[in-house]
Amino acid sequence: MLIYLIIIIIAYLLGNISTSYIVAKKLAGVDIRTQGSGNAGSTNVLRTLGKKAGALTFIGDVLKGLIAVLIARLIAYGVHMDQSICAYFAVVAVVLGHNYPAFLGFKGGKGVATSLGSMLGMNPLVALMCLGFFIIIVAITKYVSLGSILGIGLSPIIMLINHNTKGVLVALFLTISVAITHKENIKRLLNGTERKIGEKKN
């Protein structure tokens, strides 16, 4: 239990590293939470500060998810514990740390890039399939939010097909987490007011 607790704490603290906040402060001298939608995520950074800042934020968020899982696997290997179970704990903790960072008043991002990064560490093939589905949905609809929700939503289906029971539970957590953080986007999608890529805010 102590090892699980250590993994959870490390992963949660990694999740607290807000790439969007750091990038916005360094490149533009602003608090990203006061810009655009107010969300500390890569999409808001992209829309308010441009492609370079958006790309840096996305990469940083993916990396912290990946690193959290790799650290968990390394710890598990060192103490001869189940690497998959330790990785799953890290996935949940790093995403919660990103979405609800204690160091930023529990006001974080929406967890899509961090979920992708943690999934890369958990199951690279599933992560790449979800990313590919995300790209297809966004290319067709121009809605990043819809691509994010459906992309992550594909993960538990793939896990279920592969009979990965524990993986299904973690993938369901990621899906529900993304749905919760995108609840306002879902409302706008349903009433037709969600902004598309490149669309200016009225």
Image (cartoon, helix red, strand yellow):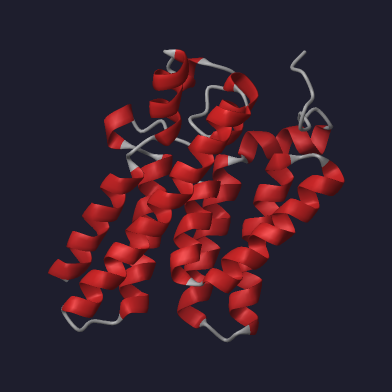
In the image, residue 59 lies at what x, y percent? 50, 44
| Furthest residue in direction bottom, as rendered | 163
Residue 86 image-quadrant placement: bottom left
Q: Can residue 113 be seen in this snapshot?
A: yes
Residue at 60% over, 48% down: 179
Q: Nearer the viewer, residue 189 or 59?
A: 59
Q: Nearer the viewer, residue 55 or 87?
A: 55
| Furthest residue in direction left, as rendered | 2
Residue at 45% over, 78% down: 166
Q: Is residue 169 above or below residue 182?
A: below
In the image, residue 48 lies at what x, y percent? 60, 20
Residue at 33% over, 38% down: 17
Residue 172 image-quadrant placement: bottom right
Image quadrant in which the N terminus is located: bottom left
Q: Viewed as shown, does residue 71 lie left or right of 194?
A: left
Q: Is residue 22 above or below residue 89?
A: above
In the image, residue 30 lies at what x, y percent? 44, 14
Q: Can residue 110 be seen in this snapshot?
A: no
Q: Viewed as shown, does residue 77 lie left or right of 195?
A: left
Residue at 40% over, 43% down: 98
| Furthest residue in direction front, as rendered | 52
Q: How many marks?
A: 0
In the image, residue 110 lies at what x, y percent? 52, 40
Image quadrant in which the C terminus is located: top right
Residue 20 image-quadrant placement: top left
